[in-house]
Image: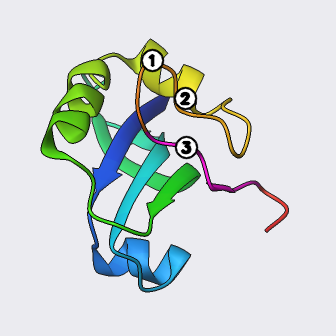
Amino acid sequence: MTSIYGILLGGSSRSRELLGDTTTVFLVHRWEVDERDEAGYPTGAHGEPVIGCVLAERPDATDVVALLKLATSQEQLERWTQTPIGANLTGTAFAATKRYNDDE
């Protein structure tokens, strides 16, 4: 199965469901491809959060832009999923506050 990582920003209903009503949330998700068509292209997938950053206050726009500029490679997103709770995601101003795993 192929893993694809992505980042979710803001206060979506899914992020509020996972982390509660917060000002700003960043979640790194891992998506697993479930189905492919005859040519091998993904046609179905499921995803779950791996790590989250919850901020009590709205972040500075330059910090958000810096995060988004770094979040362009699968390798970087996968490295962020290994961030210890309380430590900043490498190269950003945002600390990991919650880890998700198969045991939850």
State which quarter of the image contains the C terminus.
Answer: bottom right
Check disc 3 and give the amino acid type. Ala
Residue bearing mark 2: 80
Which of the 4 image quarters holds residue 65?
top left
On screen, residue 8 above or below 38: below
Can the viewer see residue 2 in this picture?
A: no
Residue 62 location in percent, x, y?
A: 16, 35
Taking the spot 29% from the left edge, 31% from the top edge, the residue there is 67
State which mark lies toward you, 3 or 2: 3
Dominant SS in magenta: loop
Check disc 1 and give the amino acid type. Gln
Dot 3, crowdedness within 10 Å: few (<14), some or many (≥20)?
A: some
Taking the spot 40% from the left edge, 71% from the top edge, the residue there is 15
Magenta residues (range)? 94-101
Residue 13 location in percent, x, y?
A: 32, 81
- CB atoms at circles 2 and 1 under 8 Å apart? yes
Can the viewer see residue 50 in this picture?
A: yes
Residue bearing mark 1: 76
**Marks 3/1: CA distance?**
15 Å
Taking the spot 55% from the left edge, 29% from the top edge, the residue there is 80
Going from N to C along the chain, the mark reached first, 3 or 2, is 2
Disc 1 secondary structure class: helix
Disc 2 secondary structure class: helix
Which of the 4 image quarters holds residue 88?
top right
Between residues 66 and 8, which one lies in front from this camera angle? 66
On screen, residue 23 above or below 79: below
Check disc 2 and give the amino acid type. Trp
On screen, residue 42 above or below 75: below
Residue bearing mark 3: 95
